[in-house]
Image (tube, grey):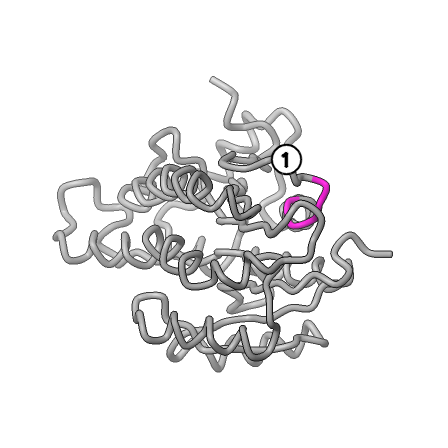
Amino acid sequence: MGLLNDHRILVTGVLTDDSLAFGIAKRALEEGATIALSGAGRGLSLTKRTARKLGDVGEIIELDVTDPNQVEAAAAELTTRFGRLDGLVHAIGMAPPSCLGNGMFASPFEDVATALHVSTFSLAALVGACRPLLQKSEALGGASVIALDFDGSRAYPAYDWMGVMKAGLESLGRYVAKEVGPDKIRVNMLAAGPIRTVAAKSVPGFSQFEDAWTEKAPLGWDVYDSSAVADTAVAMLSPLLRGTTASVIYVDGGYHSMG
């Protein structure tokens, strides 16, 4: 019997098979979940192609989190197809090029606002639209929302405004958890160490992260292996962590606690 038997879960952000979201969706399927994926714009066709590598995906829906109409339409489609949600994985993040590797004074507000809308505000938009579905969860302990994170407690080289967005995501996650907790919906952030994904390629000087984690993470860290992240996500989606909410769960080899 799988940890996620009879769980109905929406996983956003699956573009390629090296993404954290793909690894989470794959493990959730292995643990018995029924999965819906979402994609946006030109990325939707990529999501559909990548979904073939997962096999039994229940639904693929179009979801541009910056378009309120699409957010509502996606929730309506999930209501029709699934009837409820037991889990939601928020793996959505994007910042215009000016926001990464250029320091904090080069980005125009319009670019920062775009990064905020896609990477941070979208968590509230998505949970708000899906709240009625999450309230209907039949899982022990209720529904689970996971927001993929990257340690927002400190400043990292070249991460710049995206670091601010992750710090905002962590704060927003706590406030959303406070609001939906009475509905037996828990909201946690999963702060993964650096993994070589398509998203990572947009971060200038990503090799600096690799070097830092290699030197300081007590457990070591492999930027090509996201399996520990996927396993932790499965535990967070399952009833095993039903008493945990408003928390940042680190899967980074212990790096975040080192000096």
From the viewer's perspective, tell me whether residue 229 is left or right of residue 95.
right
| Quadrant assignment, res 16 | bottom right
Give the residue at the far top of this rendering.
259
Say whether residue 167 is left or right of residue 217: left
In the image, which residues are magenta?
236-240
Q: x and y percent of residue 149 in the render? A: 46, 44
Q: Nearer the viewer, residue 151 or 179?
A: 179
- Image point 13% across, 52% down: which residue? 109
- Residue drawn at x 51%, y 34% is 247
Image position of 186 with respect to 98: above or below: above
Residue 113 in magenta stretch: no
- Helix, strand or loop under label 1: loop
Position of the N terminus, as image quadrant, is: bottom right
Three-letter amino acid code of the residue under disc 1 = Gly
Residue 126 image point, x, y percent: 42, 60
Give me the residue at 51% from left, 43% from top: 182
Say which residue appears at 31% left-offset and 70% top-offset.
68
Count how many numbered circles sit on residues in the image.
1
Q: Does 44 sit above or below residue 20?
A: below
Q: Which residue is mark 1?
A: 243
Main SS of the magenta part reads helix
